[in-house]
Image (tube, rainbow, N blue to C red):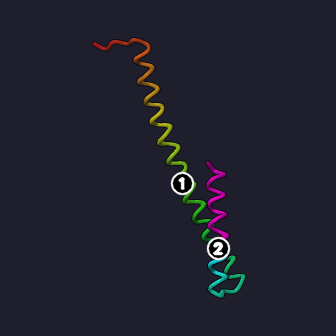
Amino acid sequence: MNKIVLNFGLLIFFLSVLIFSEKGFQWDVVLLRSFVIFMVVSVMGSFFAMAFVKAINKTSLEKGNELNEKLSGSNKK
């Protein structure tokens, strides 16, 4: 998942380099702005990925516990 986030961040970085250079900014400004955008997108993507994985793990753990209870034959009276 981290590799996907990094690749997406790099894609955004290079697209922002193209967009800012087409607008006529100086190269140092272009690289600085693109790097800031890369960092923001990568951090936000990492948080999103962690939340997504945590939600999947929680759901699968609940289903696993439920299935385990059914298979063990525990009858609650």
Image coords of residue 60 (percent x, y): 48, 33
The one of 62 and 25 positioned closer to us in this rendering:
25
Q: Secondary structure at mark 1?
A: helix
| Amino acid marked by disc 2 | Ser
Image coords of residue 48 (percent x, y): 52, 53
At horizontal 66% and vertical 58% (from top left) the residue drawn is: 7
Q: Which residues are magenta?
A: 1-16
| Amino acid marked by disc 1 | Phe
At horizontal 64% and vertical 73% (from top left) the residue drawn is: 34
Q: Considering only vertical position in the picture, is 14 above or below 67?
A: below
> What residue is shown with label 2?
34
**Residue 47 tag number:** 1
Badge 2, how many Cα within 10 Å: few under 14, some, many 20+?
many
Q: Locate residue 28 relative to residue 72 in the image: left or right.
A: right
Image coords of residue 49 (percent x, y): 55, 50
Badge 1, how many Cα within 10 Å: few under 14, some, many 20+?
few
Q: Secondary structure at mark 2?
A: helix
Q: Locate residue 19 relative to residue 71 in the image: left or right.
A: right
Secondary structure mostly taken by the magenta-highlighted segment of the chain: helix
At horizontal 56% and vertical 57% (from top left) the residue drawn is: 45
